Amino acid sequence: LSALPTQDPGPSEPGPNATGSEISHLLVRAGGYLCALPLPAVRRVLRGVVVHPLPGAAPELRGLAEFAGEPLAVLDLARLVRAPLGANPAHPVTIIAWIGQGESRELVGLAADGALDVVRLSEEGTVGGDGDLVRGEAVVGGEVVRVLDLEAFGRATAS
Amino acid sequence: MSGPALRSGYVLMRHGKTLWAVADAAVRSVTRVENGYRLQLAAAELLADEVVGIVPSLKPHPISPAVRRFWAMPTAGLAVYGHEPLVLLDPEELPASLRCDPPSVEVS
């Protein structure tokens, strides 16, 4: 597996660039959406991950991969955020990230169509949200970005 | 497959694009058939495209919440063989998609 430049601040510690309510986010493309993933939850960005599909799985679950000698669920980020179809990805990536919280906290792969940039977003600049994975929307460079709350993954179905 | 009564390890088999493993002790026989292999277990017969081999041990991992959320198939967990993830089968609860069609029963 080839690794892109990464930051690994750990699963629960604030990122190195976090100041006040402003947190660094990894900007990725997922289908027709731009999404921002909180950088403290991101462990690594990989390309060329081999995914083994599971028969009968929902489309949100692309399959299993091997990461650090252990099985890793690879989820389709575009499906998770219900993004419309986008252009064929030129540089698809798998973002290894922590999702969920408490006993449900786990490391997964999030398949995305490209990793674009690291941006700093404030909570005040984020509006809306679905109470689950999408914390809200923000505008970055004139484009709407879905800001994700990876800790909230599964909260809507668990409660 | 017909070794001593006490056996350990796992039989690895491929079905479709997925690698599966079942406890060696649960496998009674393996038969080559036209479209692959039939593994006879106590409760059912499994169909495999390929029998990869037998490994002495695997490190089982429980099914993670993310997998469970999007995949309802009964399993005994996950593991990795080499660099390939695999699904551990529960011999007592085998997924229907791996089972050979049950023999037809004539009703008189």
Image (cartoon, coloured by chain):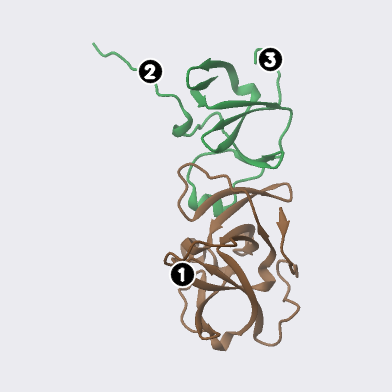
Residue beneath disc 1: A32
From mark 2 to mark 1, how far is it between C-alphas?
49 Å
Frontmost of labels 2 and 1 is 1
In the image shown, does A110 or A34 lie closer to the viewer? A34
Frontmost of labels 2 and 3 is 2
Q: Is residue A159 visible in the rendered structure shown here?
A: no
Residue beneath disc 2: B103
Colour seen for chain B:
green
Q: Amino acid at mark 3?
A: Ala
Q: Do the CB atoms of the residues marked 1 and 3 lie less than 8 Å apart? A: no
Q: Quadrant of residue A75?
A: bottom right
Point 60% across, 62% down: residue: A91
Image location of residue A33, percent across then percent down: 48, 71
Frontmost of labels 1 and 3 is 1
| Neighbour tally class for label 1: few under 14, some 14-19, many 20 plus, Cα within 10 Å | some
Name the chain under label 3.
B
Answer left or right for A137 relative to A11.
left
Q: Amino acid at mark 2?
A: Pro
Q: Image height check: is A18 above or below A57?
A: below
Q: Quadrant of residue B19?
A: top right
Q: Which mark is residue B5?
A: 3
From mark 1 to mark 3, how far is it between C-alphas?
57 Å
Point 53% across, 27% down: residue: B49
Q: Which SS class for mark 3?
A: loop
Answer left or right for A49 relative to A53.
right
Name the chain under label 2.
B
Point 71% across, 52% down: residue: A1
Q: Which mark is residue B7?
A: none
Q: Image height check: is A45 above or below A143?
A: above
Colour seen for chain A:
brown
From mark 2 to mark 3, how far is it between C-alphas?
28 Å
First-in-chain label (2 vs 3): 3
